[in-house]
Amino acid sequence: MSAPIWPLVAAVVSGLDSPALPRSLAALLRHVAPFSYAVMFAYHGTNPPLDVYDDFPPNKRKIFVTDYQAGPYLLDPFFLAATQPVAAGLYRLRDLAPDRFYQGEYYRNYYAQTGLAEEIAYFVDLPGKAILVLSLMRAEKPFSQREYLALQALFPFVAAIAARHWAGVSLQFRTDQGPKAAGRQRRAIAHELGRFGDGILTPREREVAEFTLQGHSAESTGQILGIAAGTVRIHRRNIYSKLNINSQGELFSRFLGTLVDTS
């Protein structure tokens, strides 16, 4: 590295418990491996994500934050991983995504609009069962293995800083949301996705629709549900017929419409 890293480390430490901390932390990580944007979402169970910091320009913030929080986050591999939850650490998006994520409608109709070459994220456990997902996004090219390993080596420091600075973030999910958002928080992801097609689709068809929307292939969905891939394809045909649609794109649009109608 051309410039010394220690002044940036000092800025992070001195920024603890102040509004300067997130920007200082992003600057440190950029020094280790340059990236286009950083966003830090706090997750708590299946509540809508809380944007605790981002450095997007206004035209990008609409896609990455405003549109995301309106519903697509329910199909985000990082959000889904946080609800499991995965072990704390650094992850590439492609390592957590379903097998057909990049051919799926969430990617085509939402994620592709971001124009990213790659997204990686730190998952940090916070007090109160909250999780901080600190995403580093590149528009030009993926992170090299060397860059990834350098960022991975910083994880203990990042985790310690985040756990201290955002120690009380879990309380914000109960107190800092309006009545409309609070109503949405009480609905778990299974309910959000399960109510899709309610009264029209069978419980099994709703499960198949859920995994299809997330980007799972028929084979992957079959393995998760314990049924044959051919049976999954039959369920998909029945779903399309019952909903009077002809493609996964229409399925995705219908799902987003359900979220808007119930918000």
Image: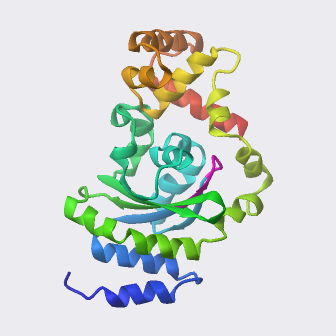
Residue sitting at 43 percent across and 20 percent down?
A: 222
User: Can I make out residue 203 in this image?
Assistant: yes
Task: Kindly indicate the quadrant of the structure image that contains residue 171.
Answer: bottom right
The answer to whether 219 appears left or right of 256 in the picture is: left
The percent position of residue 66, horizontal first and vertical second, equals: 56, 54
234 left or right of 3? right
Coordinates of residue 146 in the picture (x, y in percent): 20, 64
Say if the magenta span includes residue 5.
no
Please report the residue visible at 46 percent of the width from the left and 53 percent of the height from the top: 87
Q: Nearer the viewer, residue 244 or 23?
A: 23
**Quadrant of image for the N terminus:** bottom left
Give the vertical position of 100 relative to 76 (above or below).
above
49 or 225, nearer to the observer: 225
Say which residue appears at 51% left-offset and 14% top-offset: 240
Instruction: In the displayed orientation, state which residue is furthest to the right.
Output: 179
> Which residues make up the magenta segment?
41-48
Query: Which residue is painted at 30% across and 57% down in the image?
Result: 139
Q: Nearer the viewer, residue 93 or 89?
A: 89
Specify whether residue 46 is painted magenta: yes
